[in-house]
Structures are given as C-alpha cells and as structure tokens.
C-alpha cells in the first residue's frame, strides 16, 4: 500500500507521522541536565535550589558517601558548593547567603561551585 497523502513529519522529528501521533505515551522520552563544577570565576547558569543542588552533586563528583547541608555562611560561595575529601566523603552544601558574591575557592576550604554545563 502507498503511504497516506499527508505532509511528512519534519526531518528532525523523533516520530514517524505514519506510525503514530507525536503526543503518544508509547515512546518514553528522557530529559536531563548536565552539570559542571567551577573552582574559580562565576558559574554562568546557577543551580536554583538546595534539592537541585543535592541531586546534581553526585553527577559531577564521585564519592562513597554524600553529606548534604544547608547553611548561611558569608565566607563560602553562595548557592551550590561541593567539597570532596580524600576518604571518599563528599559534602554538598547549599549556602543561602546570597550576599556572598564569590564562587569557587573559599578561604575556609577548597570547594567548587556547581552550575549548569555550558
């Protein structure tokens, strides 16, 4: 049988217009965000909240144990901060102090800011 007389789907479409509606629930689409760390400078796109921070850290820093905490500390970079220890323990810290404009290295400890990968 010949194909139906309808315009084909766009060349970049992830579906076949002949086989299915693009709104189908049969095809599972996965979405994810890539994150990166920054040891100096300013992250271009910042992590928005503590839950996103704590979910992002294992994707950028490998460890055996992850500790999470929320702090208000002017001496740390604001936002999502991560510190990896030689023991394999990784500290994921969400610093709520937005007056701390620094990102990356801190006077207190060697830390990295976490943000979206470019």
Image: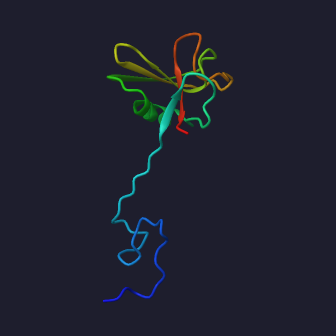
Q: Quadrant of residue 14?
A: bottom left
Residue extending furthest toward the top: 108
The part of the image, by quadrant, that contains residue 108 is top right
Residue in the image at 36% along x and 65% along y? 25
| Residue 50, position as x, y percentages in the image | 51, 32
Quadrant (top left, top right, bottom left, bottom right) of the N terminus? bottom left
Judge whether 110 appears above or below 23 on screen.
Answer: above
Q: Is residue 15 left or right of residue 100?
A: left
Q: Quadrant of the C terminus?
A: top right
> Residue 104: where, in percent of width, then height?
58, 21
The residue lying at 44 percent from left, 46 percent from top is: 32
Where is residue 82? Give x, y as percent: 48, 23
Task: Say if 17 sits above or below 95 in the image.
Answer: below
Against 98, residue 74 (above or below) is: above
Q: Is residue 106 above or below residue 5?
A: above
Q: Residue 109: horizontal and vertical position, in percent?
A: 52, 12
Q: Residue at x 59, y 10 (%)?
A: 107
Q: Residue at x 55, y 35 (%)?
A: 47
Please indicate whether residue 96 sits to the left or right of residue 58 in the image: right
Count of numbered circles in the view: 0
The colour scheme applied to this rendered structure is rainbow
């Amino acid at each position: 049988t010949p194909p139906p007389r309808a315009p084909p789907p766009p060349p970049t479409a992830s579906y076949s217009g002949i086989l299915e509606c693009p709104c189908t629930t049969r095809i599972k689409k996965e979405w994810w965000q890539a994150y990166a760390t920054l040891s100096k400078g300013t992250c271009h796109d910042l992590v928005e909240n503590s839950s996103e921070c704590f979910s992002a850290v294992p994707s950028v820093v490998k460890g055996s144990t992850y500790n999470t905490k929320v702090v208000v500390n002017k001496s740390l970079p604001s936002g999502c901060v991560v510190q990896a220890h030689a023991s394999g323990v990784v500290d994921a810290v969400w610093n709520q102090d937005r007056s701390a404009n620094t990102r990356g290295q801190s006077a207190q400890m060697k830390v990295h800011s976490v943000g979206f990968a470019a």
